[in-house]
Image (cartoon, rainbow, N blue to C red):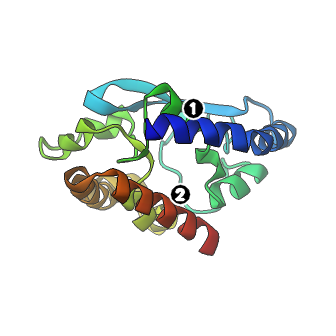
Amino acid sequence: MFDIFASGLGLICLSPLFAILAIWIKLDSKGPVFYRQVRVGKNGKDFRIFKFRSMRPDSDKGRLITVGGHDPRITRSGYFIRKYKLDEFPQLINVFKGDMSLVGPRPEVRRYVDLYSPEQMKVLSVRPGITSLASIRYRNENDILAAADDPDKCYIEKVMPDKLKIDLEYVEKASLPYDVKLIFQTFREIITK
C-alpha cells in the first residue's frame, strides 16, 4: 500500500517535471522519450522497466554497461538527467503497476541474472526497487567501470557480487522503517553529491 500511495503521489507531483524532461529529450535527439528494457523481477519474472531515455536509440545493441561520464552514446540531456538520477523517476510507473517497489535490489538484465549463484538468487524473493543500499554505495559505478580494462569483466567479477552481497543483507532486514530511511538517504546522496 505504501508503494502504491507513494508512487501515485509522486507521479502526480512530478508530472510537470516529467513534461519538461520529455520535451528536452525530444528536442535533444531523435527517438522515444522513454527507454524500455526487459529486467528480471520478483521470482524471476521478466518485466519492462521505464526510464527516461538518456542515450541514443539502439545504444544497448552493443554493450549493456555504461562506462564513465563521457560515454559517447549518452545524449546531452542524458548527461544531466543521469547525473541527478532523473532518468530513474519513470520507474514510479513500474512501482504503481506492482513490478517494482520504491526500495529493493535493483533489477538486473537476464544475461547477468543467469550468472547468479543459488545464494544470490535469493535477491529475487523480493520486488526490485528504484533505490537500494547497493545503488547508494555504488553511485559512482560508471566511473569504476570506466577505469577498468574490461568493464564487463569488472562488473561480473567485482561490482555485481559486492552489490548482491549488500542486497542479500537488505532482504534479511527489509521493513517499512528501513525502506523510509533508505529513501531519505538516497535523496541526501543525490542532493549533496
Task: Answer above or below: position of 129 versus 141.
Answer: above
Identify the residue at image location x=52%, y=31%.
96
Q: State whether residue 28 appears in this view.
A: yes
Quadrant holding the N terminus: top left
Task: Please tell me whether residue 27 is drawn above or below residue 171 in the rendered image.
Answer: above
Report the disc number at residue 93: 1
Q: Quadrant of residue 9?
A: top right
Q: Quadrant of the C terminus?
A: bottom right
Specify the amino acid type for callout 1: Ile
Q: Position of residue 122 (x, y in %)?
A: 18, 42
Q: Is residue 193 visible?
A: no
Against 160, residue 92 (above or below) is above
User: Compared to 177, does 120 lie above or below?
Assistant: above
**Residue lying at 77% horizontally and 53% vertically, measured from the top left:** 76
Left or right of 63, for residue 15: right
Dot label at residue 67: 2
**SS category of the residue bearing label 1:** helix
Quadrant of the rendered image containing residue 44: top left
Q: Secondary structure at mark 2?
A: loop
Q: Position of residue 92 (x, y in %)?
A: 56, 38
Image coords of residue 75 (percent x, y): 73, 48
Tell me the residue at 66%/47% (across/down).
Answer: 73
Q: Which one is earlier in the sequence, the residue at label 2 or at label 1?
A: 2
Q: Are marks 2 and 1 in contact (CB under 8 Å)?
A: no
Q: Determine the CA span between mark 2 and mark 1.
A: 27 Å
Along the horizontal axis of the image, is 75 left or right of 124? right
Classify 10 Å Cα crowding around label 1: few (below 14), some (14-19), many (20 and above).
some
Q: Residue at x 28, y 52 (%)?
A: 174
